[in-house]
């Protein structure tokens, strides 16, 4: 289950997948900014953007159901915040335009992350001059995320098999202990990673 | 100890001592050498100091060097200002390949070492491909480390040091968590590499099958040294140092 | 409270983006200067840790559930500047790979959760530590209260951004956001404190490594963040406060949104318990209710700290003894 969560990239051989990462990132970001800066009632423009996204989605050969599922996972939050806008004069218009804009932007990013490897996105960020420390942190985070989740799952399983009458308080404390162990392990691993970097010639 | 003649030894350690920050003695005057192209095993119970010893081979330890360096690699002392060159020549493989495979893709990880040495395109990609082919992972460039098997991860780490033209491999428990097939593949790989190797391991069968010499370490000191068949057959001594006579030697018929 | 795209308008996104970039810049500089090189990979790994922690959700009144932000968790474990980078890293990954938080809202999200939350949180933490001493109990008290404050502060900034963008009226945004997050903040305080208590029990030296130098707050470090947070609050929140001095009104006029300063009465519907009976203006009602809430939160934090302090550790005071970290080599 967490594999779906942690690897949004869905491999297919399509023109969209093959398109250079910098183009995809630039395209997605441009589309998002355009949509956000459009006036509230630019419904025709929203429609045009939507059509473009549908076209790209089709070209990408990613199953429509998969894209729809990802979108549905994210929509409720958008709806929730948007609902607050209803509580003001002229709110319905604001609400609808919020919904349109957010959905278009969500689609854009979902398509981007499904067709572009994160390592390629990182390379784009590097080339754009994002500070190396930030790029390295992003890379390490992405690399060790699944390992961390696996360790957490394993520890939880171990604890559950030793708990016979789980009270709520005990469960919370047990989760906190697991989290603490995970952090301590991460801290130790960080030092070993640093040693490994030095072992391969890294100089600070 | 084999005396070096005209050839310089790949590794020479002379009276190496080391204490942990909390004061416990880890290494008590260890001396050994590894000749060029030789495969030497380092065995001993947990806590003997094997990993600590390996960390001295490329200068990761001691944290605060003082006095004359006790370790020499191909004649060069393992100390500043030689450390960058040393670290290119000594390929240290850690116990947990996940600690060493820290880059987002296999290609980037294998390219990491050469990049630190100053290699750039187009030679860089060639180096990476060659190293991956050498370990039997040609075509793995775009794979993500988190999706590789344990054995594949170890081989990528190996490719990473081979890409730097390492001349001495220091391996910490290379077969510890491999399945039988992974173990066989790694063993064959180590056999095929002509470079000098020092392998810290619990896998005594591996020692007998691949290494020309074995050094037994216990409590931070060397307690035995010699050809594997000889040293590991001494059952009494093996048990004394928390080891045992490997099965492969139990059923050998003298020819 | 990841703001999606479309909820923050152009000028707000720009202002927040500038503040976020400045804040990240300060953090990067501080980390490069004073964070030990051998711990640098921990920033990335801690980001993975916080990301995983953010996936935890807990029920909050009224069918909603709250999520951990993790800013104070990161700040106590790694120090304020590293925490800013950790939170920034998490938010950037979430934005681009998981569409959690909009691209145009990234500046605002970073400002709220990677600057305000750790900045305000760590400042509160440091002050409480200073006042309450160096004991384990004071650590937990400081952590709990700081976590609550960080959540509420971030929520207020978020409400300000939504209101300034014209998405949600201030009179609705503040009670909705700040109100709910006063409850969510309790969850954050509980979880953060439990984890810090567990780490303190396992490896107290890990916490000492990130502690400020003996007896001194890292004033210079916190001052920069404080300035940025204050600027942000001036831009996003101050226009809505009533009876403020002329200087801020000038800022509002200069930025062109003084017309949106809310005179709208607080609606009866959303959270009636945040209206103090007898007070007309919704904002001052909330402020008073907020103060009461703050005192309640402090009280709860104290209770929590008492419950979690192991027997005997409560009374220890004075400077923690230095312990050198073990060599990472395993024999």
Image (tube, rainbow, N blue to C red):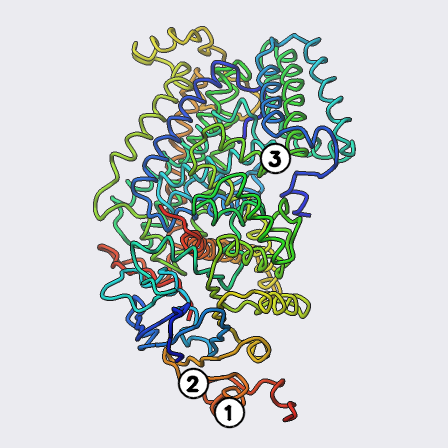
Question: Callout 3: few (<14), some (14-19), or many (20+) C-alpha neighbours within 10 Å?
Answer: many
**SS category of the residue bearing label 3:** helix
Q: Are marks 1 and 3 in contact (CB under 8 Å)?
A: no
Q: Quadrant of residue A167?
A: bottom right
Image location (x, y in percent) of residue A139: 51, 42
Mark sitting on residue B234: 1
Q: Position of residue C11 (x, y in %)?
A: 47, 13
Instruction: Read off the chain for label 3.
Output: C
Mark 1 chain = B
Q: Is residue C198 visible?
A: no
Q: Name the residue beneath numbered marker 3.
A: C98
Tell me how far mark 2 sits from mark 3, CA to CA. 57 Å
Residue at the image point whose x is 49% and y is 39% from the top: C69
Report helix, strand or loop for mark 1.
loop
Foreground tag (2 vs 3): 2
* Residue that badge 2 annotates: B224
Q: Quadrant of the C terminus of chain C?
A: bottom left
In the rendered image, the vertical position of residue A38 relative to residue A54, given as above or below: above
Eye-nearest disc, 1 or 3:
1
Instruction: From the viewer's side, name the closer residue of C262 and B137.
Output: B137
Q: Earlier in the sequence, mark 2 or mark 1?
A: 2
In the picture as drawn, the residue positioned furthest to the front comes out as: B6
């Amino acid at each position: 289950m967490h594999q779906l969560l942690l690897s949004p990239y869905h491999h297919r051989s399509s023109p969209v997948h093959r398109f250079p990462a910098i183009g995809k990132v630039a395209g997605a970001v441009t589309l998002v900014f355009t949509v956000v800066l459009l006036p509230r009632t630019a419904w025709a423009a929203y429609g045009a953007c939507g059509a473009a996204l549908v076209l790209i989605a089709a070209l990408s050969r990613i199953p429509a159901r998969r894209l729809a599922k990802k979108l549905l996972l994210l929509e409720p939050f958008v709806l929730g915040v948007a609902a607050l806008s209803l509580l003001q004069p002229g709110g319905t218009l604001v609400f609808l335009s919020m919904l349109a804009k957010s959905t278009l932007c969500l689609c854009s990013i979902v398509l981007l992350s499904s067709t572009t490897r994160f390592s390629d996105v990182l390379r784009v960020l590097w080339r754009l001059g994002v500070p190396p420390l930030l790029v390295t942190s992003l890379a390490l985070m992405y690399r060790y995320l699944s390992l961390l989740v696996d360790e957490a799952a394993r520890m939880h399983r171990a604890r559950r098999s030793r708990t016979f009458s789980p009270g709520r308080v005990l469960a919370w404390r047990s989760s906190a202990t697991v989290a603490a162990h995970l952090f301590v392990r991460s801290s130790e691993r960080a030092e070993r990673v640093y040693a490994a970097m030095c072992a391969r010639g890294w100089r600070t | 100890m084999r005396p070096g003649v005209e050839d310089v030894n790949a590794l020479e350690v002379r009276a190496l001592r080391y204490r942990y920050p909390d004061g416990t003695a880890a290494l008590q005057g260890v001396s050994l050498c590894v000749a060029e192209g030789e495969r030497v095993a380092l065995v001993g119970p947990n806590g003997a100091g094997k990993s600590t010893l390996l960390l001295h081979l490329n200068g990761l330890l001691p944290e605060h060097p003082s006095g004359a360096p006790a370790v020499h690699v191909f004649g060069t002392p393992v100390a500043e200002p030689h450390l960058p060159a040393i670290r290119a020549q000594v390929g240290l493989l850690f116990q947990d390949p996940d600690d060493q495979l820290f880059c987002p893709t296999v290609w980037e990880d294998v390219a990491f070492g050469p990049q630190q040495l100053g290699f750039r395109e187009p030679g860089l990609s060639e180096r990476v491909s060659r190293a991956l082919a050498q370990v039997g992972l040609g075509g793995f460039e775009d794979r993500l480390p988190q999706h590789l098997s344990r054995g594949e991860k170890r081989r990528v780490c190996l490719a990473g040091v081979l890409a730097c033209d390492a001349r001495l491999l220091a391996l910490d428990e290379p077969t510890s968590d491999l399945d039988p097939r992974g173990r066989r593949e790694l063993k064959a790989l180590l056999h095929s590499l002509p470079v000098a190797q020092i392998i810290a391991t619990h896998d005594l069968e591996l020692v007998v099958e691949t290494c020309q010499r074995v050094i037994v370490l216990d409590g931070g000191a060397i307690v035995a040294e010699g050809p594997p068949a000889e040293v590991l057959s001494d059952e009494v001594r093996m048990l004394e140092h928390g080891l045992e006579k490997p099965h492969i030697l139990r059923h050998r018929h003298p020819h | 409270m990841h703001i999606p795209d479309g909820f923050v308008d152009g000028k707000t996104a720009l202002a927040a983006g500038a503040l976020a970039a400045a804040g990240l810049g300060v953090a990067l500089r501080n980390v490069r200067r004073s964070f030990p090189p051998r711990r640098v990979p921990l920033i990335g790994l801690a980001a993975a840790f916080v990301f995983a922690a953010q996936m935890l959700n807990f029920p909050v009144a009224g069918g909603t559930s709250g999520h951990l932000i993790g800013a104070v968790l990161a700040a106590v474990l790694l120090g304020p500047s590293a925490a800013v980078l950790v939170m920034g890293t998490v938010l950037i990954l979430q934005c681009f790979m998981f569409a959690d938080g909009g691209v145009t809202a990234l500046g605002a999200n970073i400002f709220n959760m990677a600057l305000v939350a750790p900045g305000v949180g760590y400042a509160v933490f440091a002050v409480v530590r200073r006042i309450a001493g160096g004991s384990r109990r004071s650590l937990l008290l400081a952590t709990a209260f700081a976590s609550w404050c960080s959540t509420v502060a971030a929520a207020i900034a978020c409400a300000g951004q939504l209101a300034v963008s014209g998405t949600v009226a201030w009179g609705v945004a503040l009670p909705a956001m700040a109100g709910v997050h006063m409850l969510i903040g309790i969850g954050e305080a509980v979880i953060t404190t439990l984890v810090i208590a567990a780490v303190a029990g396992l490896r107290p030296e890990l916490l000492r490594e990130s502690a400020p130098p003996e007896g001194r707050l890292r004033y210079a470090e916190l001052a920069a963040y404080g300035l940025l947070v204050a600027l942000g609050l001036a831009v996003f929140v101050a226009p809505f406060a009533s009876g403020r001095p002329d200087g801020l009104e000038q800022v509002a006029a200069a930025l062109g949104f003084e017309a949106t300063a809310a005179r709208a009465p607080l609606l009866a519907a959303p959270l009636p318990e945040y209206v103090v009976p007898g007070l007309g203006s919704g904002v001052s009602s909330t402020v008073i209710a907020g103060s009461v809430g703050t005192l309640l939160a402090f009280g709860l934090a104290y209770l929590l700290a008492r419950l979690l302090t192991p027997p005997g550790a409560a009374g220890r005071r004075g400077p923690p003894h230095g312990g050198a970290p073990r060599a990472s080599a395993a024999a």
